[in-house]
Structures are given as structure tokens and as C-alpha cells.
Amino acid sequence: MFWLRTPQKLYIKKGCLSVALDELRAVYGKKKAFIVTDKNLYKYGKLSTLEDNLNLMGIQHICFYAVEDNADIKAVTSGAKQASLFEPDVIIGFGNNAAIDSSKLIRLMYEYPDVSLSELSGKFNDIMSREGKFPKLGSKSILVTIPDISGNASEVSPYAVIADGEDELIFADYELMPDMAVVDGDLMLPENKSLSADAGLNTLVRAVNAYDSVSATEYTDGFAIEAIKGVFEYLPSVIENGANDPRGCEKLGEASAMAGIAYANTESIISVDGSAPYLADVVRLSAADNEVSTARYAALADALGLPGDSEDERVTSFINKIGELVSLCGLDNKKCE
């Protein structure tokens, strides 16, 4: 049996934030929002558009901004306690991967204060072999996720990762899937080229992993292929021009979400960050060991319009294309040990 799970609502394109937030009031009848974000976004006023829209719609809200660059269990526990005092009917994760992952677990602990995060977390190879049964969410709140940077795709995924001291807790369950995700191009303007490079390459890794997954389907393939095409088409310009290429930034945000959907619906491993330098060699090894992978990577080369008379030649073109993009992003291509 195969499946395709996404947020119930997924808003895309520039300026869609206000339309999505209006639905919270007009359709869902929400009155109190608990915003989860990080210190820098709050400090530098990056939440002003979000808060202005909530004010306009008469939705009372408070902001929890204690999330650090990496999500941690202390912030999640503190956020859940504050949410319990405020009693929101919507929780909004705004910002990067850490803020959105934290919002998922804050919602879980808000609805089930006695839940044991350690019992629900566990190392796993894919979402279908996770440990622990998650309780049903949604009795008190809905979850809205709004990324301000492309590449992580937590806004459309059933995954969350937080730190517990020196340990890493990994969560995977479709109960963590947001009810609504908002991918607004106006929020995707990067602060520097390094962030753009990391985000774009992480998107590429997710999409390629999902495409080569044993549980890939025609449905996930569509998302993965469009994400891969988007990265190759728009990332070079965004690296060069940054926020001066708003359309490129918007399209990379959409590519990230599509890669995230493909990744969330295949039996893919969760670890992605930092693996881009190895991607070309991973593709090479996979194609060398598996005729099915060879054919699929050749099909990706065809989708990208890459040259090659034989499957092997087209796979080589795809590998070289990956290597060129990794180098353009300022990274060295590495061999798998």
C-alpha cells in the first residue's frame, strides 16, 4: 500500500500569507494564536506582517520566541507551559526548521501535558518503521507552519528533531503533519548567499533521495522532479543575486516544499543536512549497483534536458550537473568512504 500525505491546506505564491490567515478567522473561527519563533526574527521585527494580519482579523496572539538556532527540549517544554496558560486554538510555527519543529512538539505537549517525548522519539530508517504510537492531535488546536527560508521543508513534513542535552530526539508520525502550511514568496528573501546555497542543496538532496526511494510512486516522482528542476534553474541566480532575485527566491521556496512532500511520502531517511557534498558520489554508486536506479537517474537527466546517447551517459551528465552546482555553492565534492 502506498500513500500521499500533505497538510490539509497548502498556500503558495507571493502575498498568500494574508489570504491564509484570513481563513483562520473566516473558515476555522480561530480566536487565539500562539506563535513559536526564534529570538532573531522577533528582535528584528520579522514577525510584523504576521502580527499585523492577526490584529486586523481580531485574532488575539502572543509570541514565544525562546527557540535557538537548534530546537531543544527545554524550549519545547517551556513553550508548552506558556501555551497551556494562554489556551490557544491555533499554534503557528514561524521561521526556520528549529522554530517549526518546536511548534509541532509544543502543540503535542499542549494537548497532552503528560506525554513522554523520550518514549515517542527513536532512531529509525523511515517513517513506517518508527517506534512509539502518537496520540491523536487536533482536539485543542490546529497547527499552521510558515517558513521564512527555503530548504528545510519542515512546514510540509511529519518530522521533528530536537536536542536533549548531547542527545538528538527524532520524531516521525503523520500526527505531526501541519494542518496548514504557508509558503509565501515575500518571506523567502535570503540574508546571505551561504543560506541560499545550503537551502538549495538541502532541497536537492531531499528530492533526489525521495526519487530514488524504493517506495517512490508516480505521485512523489512528480513533486521530486519539479523540485530538482527548480533547484537547478533558480539556485545559481539566487546565489549570485540574493534578494535581488525575488522570483528565484520564491521558486526555490516552492521547490523546497515540493521536495519535502516527496520526502515525507517515501521511506526516506531523515538525515539530510550536510550531505550535499556526497550527493554526486551517492548517485554514482547507486547507479553502478542497481539497474533500476540507472534508469531512473537517466530519466532525471532527460527531464533536465541533459545530453547522452545511452543511459550511462545521461547518468554521467546528471552526476556532473550535481557536481557543478555543489562547486558553485562553494563546497567540495566528496567521495563516500
Image (cartoon, grey):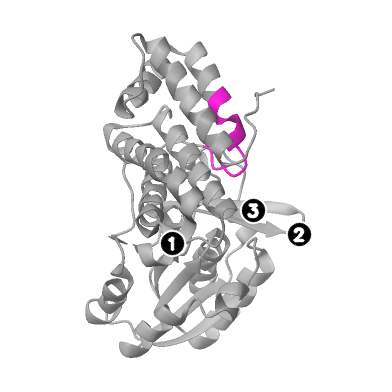
The tag on residue 165 is: 2
Inter-mark Cα distance, 3 to 1: 28 Å
Q: Is residue 122 above or below residue 301?
A: below
Report which quarter residue 281 is drawn in: top right
Q: Residues within 10 Å of mark 2 (few under 14, many from 20)?
A: few
Percent of width and height locating residue 110: 52, 74
The tag on residue 188 is: 1
Q: Is residue 337 magenta?
A: no
Report which quarter residue 304 is drawn in: top left
Q: Residue at x 57, y 82 (%)?
A: 82
Type of the residue with mark 2: Gly
Image quarter hosting the N terminus:
top left
Q: Secondary structure at mark 1?
A: loop
Please indicate, yes or no, whether residue 334 appears anywhere in the rendered image. Answer: yes
**Dot 3 or dot 1, earlier in sequence:** 3
Magenta segment boundaries in residue numbering: 269-281
42, 163: nearer the viewer: 42
**Dot 1 or dot 2, earlier in sequence:** 2
6, 201: nearer the viewer: 201
Percent of width and height locating residue 56: 32, 89
Label count reads 3
Percent of width and height locating residue 142: 38, 71
Q: From the viewer's perspective, is 329 left or right of 144?
A: right
Q: Is residue 279 magenta?
A: yes
Outermost residue to the left: 27
320, 26: nearer the viewer: 320
The residue identified by callout 3 is: 169
